[in-house]
Amino acid sequence: MASYTVTQLAKSVGISPQLVRWYEKERLLPAAARSAKGYRLFDEHARKRLEFIRHARALDFSLDDIRALLSLIDDPDAPCAKADALARRVRNKVREKIAGLQALDEELSRMIAECPSQSVRTCRVLEILADHGQCLHAEHPDVREDFPPRKRRKA
């Protein structure tokens, strides 16, 4: 049976070794065996599980969603309804983000179209940004990621 060090496992799925260690700490990956020198050794099951986690994250499933999905994988006779419900919820969130992005695109397109681009004094883009009341949409959905990213505090 194949075994992977943290670095080999990370490289095989395209993530950092630190993320592999974090997934193990969060118990999304099973605890690794240890080599005689104390290195973590993961098996093919862990690699496949890590690929699942990475793919689920790419599809915007939260870590709690992934925990729930992994628990379903660990119980193959369980009904699929929970996985289906989680996927539907994530899909609905994605659709909300898409609608928000479409609204932002509409707003930005209007701002650009209305801007004569001759001088800052008559710049419609700056006027609209300075007066939210001139926007087409009263509330813009928050579709951006936090910037700069918040750092996690150590407990």
Image (spheres, grey):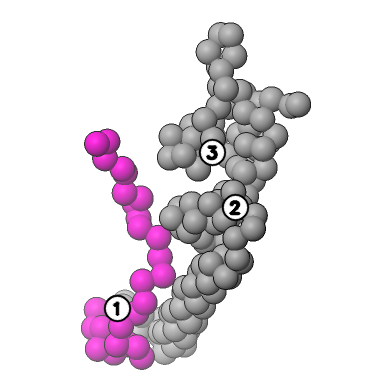
The one of 127 and 74 positioned closer to us in this rendering: 74
Query: At x 57% / y 56%, what residue is drawn?
Result: 72
| First along the sequence among labels 2 and 3 | 3
Query: At x 43% / y 40%, what residue is drawn?
Result: 26
- Give coordinates of residue 75: x percent, y percent: 59, 52
- Looking at the rendered structure, the kind of residue marked 2 is Asp
Furthest toward the front, the residue is 77
**Camera-side mark, 1 or 3:** 3
Within the image, what quadrant is residue 107 found in?
bottom left
| First along the sequence among labels 1 and 3 | 3
Per the rendering, the mark at residue 31 is: none
The one of 80 and 123 positioned closer to us in this rendering: 80
Q: CA distance from mark 1 to mark 3?
A: 46 Å
Q: Say few, some or many: other residues with alpha carbon within 10 Å of mark 1 (under 14 / 14 to 19 / 20 or more).
A: few
Vertical placement of 71 versus 99: above or below? Answer: above
**Camera-side mark, 1 or 2:** 2
- Give coordinates of residue 94: x percent, y percent: 51, 72
The C terminus sits in image quarter = top left
Vertical placement of 37 versus 113: above or below? Answer: above
- Looking at the rendered structure, the kind of residue marked 1 is Leu
Q: Which residue is mark 2?
A: 75
Q: Which residue is mark 3?
A: 29
Q: CA distance from mark 2 to mark 3?
A: 16 Å
- Looking at the rendered structure, the kind of residue marked 3 is Leu
142 left or right of 1?
A: left
Q: Is residue 126 visible?
A: yes
The one of 83 and 16 positioned closer to us in this rendering: 83
- Give coordinates of residue 117: x percent, y percent: 42, 81
Q: Secondary structure of the magenta portion, mostly?
A: loop
30 left or right of 12?
A: left
**Camera-side mark, 2 or 3:** 2
The one of 85 and 50 positioned closer to us in this rendering: 85
